[in-house]
Amino acid sequence: MTASCSDARNNESTIRSSTMMSTTTSTVTTSTDITMINSTIISMVDSMLITMNSRESVETVTTLSSISSEKDSKEVSTTSLMSDSVWECPNITKTSVECSCDFPHTLRCTGERTALQVISEHLKSSKAGTISLLDVTVTGISILPARFLENVGLHGLVISSGELRRVHENAFTALAKPLQALGLPNNLLETVPISALKYLVGLDRLDLSHNKLKTLEADSFNGLSNLTYLDLCDNLLSQLSPQAFAALPELRFLRMRGNRLSISALSALRGLKNLEELDLSSNLLLGPMGPNLLPWMPSLHFLTVSENEFINVQQGALTGVRNLSYLILSHNQIDVLEDHSFKHLSTLTRLDLANNRIVDVSSASLAHLEKLTTLDLTHNFLRSLTADLVVPLKSLEDLRLDDNEITMVSSDVPTSKLRLKRLSLSDNPLNCDCTLLEFATWLSNSSLSDEDKSSAVCATPPALENGILTQVSPGSLLCGEPTPSMTRVPLATLKEYHYDELTGINLLWNIEPCTEHYTCDTLIVYETVGDSEVQTESNPLHCDSRMMRDPCSLPVTAPPSFNLQLGHKYRYCVVLLIPTTYDDVSLGLGCSDVITLKETKQEEQHDQEPSSTNSLDVRITAVHVNVSDQGSLHVDVSLSPSKKSDASSCEISIVVFDAETAIHKCKLNCSSAFINLEVLVPGRYKVCASLDELANIESIAFSIIEDDRGRSRCVEVQSFKQNTEAIVLSIVGATCALLIALVVIGRNIVRKVRHPRIQTQCFLPAQEFEITHKAHYIKLLATTKV
């Protein structure tokens, strides 16, 4: 027999009612016989029959609810039961067919294309009610013929061929009794056989799994108003008509595992108010799991969406299924559970999040699951077991954390209040130090099974590697050198905030602790949209705490390129990089509260006292000095924020220093922060601008170039006056000297190259020999030296 697609809940059968059947119980070929078999044997599609190892050990058979015929039950007599020895399995001896009976009134046959005819003829000649369920696997047929089981009375029928492409319109019209369960799995059907199914008005279960169905039309299930179970697993379904299930008001179990359904196709489920179980695993469901993933289904208790590609669970997910008790989200790409993800699923008792990418679980994300008894987080990336994971789950009894990256159990975990009956921690790199002492004591004294207790195994320190935590003596759980010391990571908190249209957004961050070396990385801006926050802008930051006068205060200015809108709400975050050992870095983070963007002189965080004008009211951002041809200095001071609107309360002190003393002093109004100064003597000068008094700037001018508070800045320049005539004469003189030098050098070179004059001689053999010999000797001498 062919079973339906597997149920993710294993032994939790989708059919609730079950009937116990003793090994001595039997039935007779009366109406009583048929009724008892109907209530104990038929369970099509979701494991239509449970195959037992021995026919004499049948204990429990999953049944169809209310499968027995009311008419037949009125004819039964409770005293008409007889032993199983009365019933015999039909003996079909044809060479083209092989049949067997697993237990009473069930016939399984395999054969070639003539097998259907042989089986039909034999059953027609048998006593009525001999066979209640027929399972046939036949080869060589592509069309299920008309009236192939004429006058045969069955309650359940399964036909598989691997080649069946079409079902004749009258295939089931000649049955002696209304068919209640039909299975056509493992065939090649490309469409639902509407014309053949419309006559099965009493059909309760239908299995069309493992076919080639691509679409469901609005009339695909017309006439099947009594259908409660539908299996469409492992087809090619990608499109569902909005009215595909409109003709199935009583549907309670729907299996659509292993298809190609997208999120948009799920709107076809609208109207299934009696649906209790839904399997959508192994489809093409992508992106976030949001509130509107499924339509309103008030009776849904079991939902499976494993083996898809969900990336996170959003706040208030699955609003339409508020009575859910069982949710499987395993084998997805989920890395984030947003706060209040399950706030509409307070009735949930089991949650499966295995095989995802979850690094951390906040208490707010699980805050509404007070009835949850089982939580599966195996095969994720959790770093620790924290109170956030267990405190909100007041009814938790079964926690599975195998194959994560858990190294520690947080000290805030209330072990004395845990009600766990099962806790699994295998394949986690536990760091067995003194921080695990309390947890190890609780684990040893708990009522957990020995298997669960031994699942907690030490990975570090090396002396305890592979040691079972409950077997490690408390004296061995030490803190010290084996445990790397944790450096406190600097965190940033927003101290001051200012915005106006001219200067933009200015932020002053307080870094604590500021004794650790850090560098700046990024400024990130998040915009509040509804109940969520979306990143809208980011900009690289450059700073090094070792180069800052006050590393505890970090001023940051948002660049003009940020496209932020007045009246919108934003959160500002800075990312710091903290060097650690082994050329690694840690992240230091800091975020502001949500701030509405509006013009303000100054807005501070955390209810601090307003700062004086010495903080962000006015800062010198730059001092520009240009030297003219005549030696004068043009000084221009840039301020942030602008004080043009309040010029009377802002003055800038300008001082020009030579090598030793101040040679120019003056004060400027902030509204016109520029001046021209005449420098009489060429030389090197330092120009300083300050918002402090002149006496103060003289005291600091030679110690700093820039004040980190933005109160003072200094620049150095070189000034000189040009003398055009002197420059021209100098150039002419230098040119003449160069020409003379070139002439002298050229004559010397020509003189050296010129050949000596030779007087007329007829023959000078001796002199020529001497020169040759001498040259030869010199060459040998040079070679010898080398």
Image (cartoon, rainbow, N blue to C red):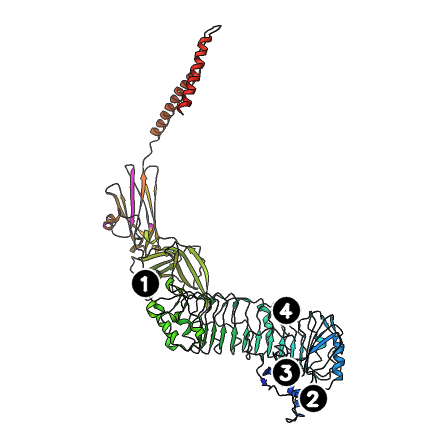
* Disc marking residue 237: 4
Callout 4 crowding tier (Cα within 10 Å): few <14, some 14–19, many ≥20: many
Name the side, left or right, on which 126 lies relative to 598: right
Q: Secondary structure at mark 2?
A: loop
Q: Earlier in the sequence, mark 3 or mark 1?
A: 3
Q: Secondary structure at mark 3?
A: loop
Q: Earlier in the sequence, mark 2 or mark 4?
A: 2
Q: Is residue 53 visible?
A: yes
Answer yes or no: do the residues labelled 3 and 1 have beta carbons within 8 Å?
A: no
Q: State the CA–CA distance, disc 3 to disc 1.
A: 66 Å
Which residue occupies the foreground of this view, 557 or 231?
231
The answer to whether residue 683 is magenta is yes
Q: Amino acid at mark 1?
A: Gly
Disc 3: which residue = 41
- Which image quadrant: the N terminus? bottom right
Disc 1: which residue = 480
Q: State the CA–CA distance, disc 2 to disc 3.
A: 15 Å
Answer yes or no: do the residues labelled 4 and 1 have beta carbons within 8 Å?
A: no
Image spot of residue 746 (x, y percent):
41, 20
- Tell me what residue is drawn at x 42 percent, y 59 percent: 524
Q: Earlier in the sequence, mark 2 or mark 3?
A: 2
* Disc marking residue 29: 2
Name the side, left or right, on which 779 lies relative to 671: right
Q: Quadrant of residue 723?
A: top left
Figure check: 703 above or below 760: below
* Disc marking residue 674: none
Q: Quadrant of residue 618?
A: bottom left
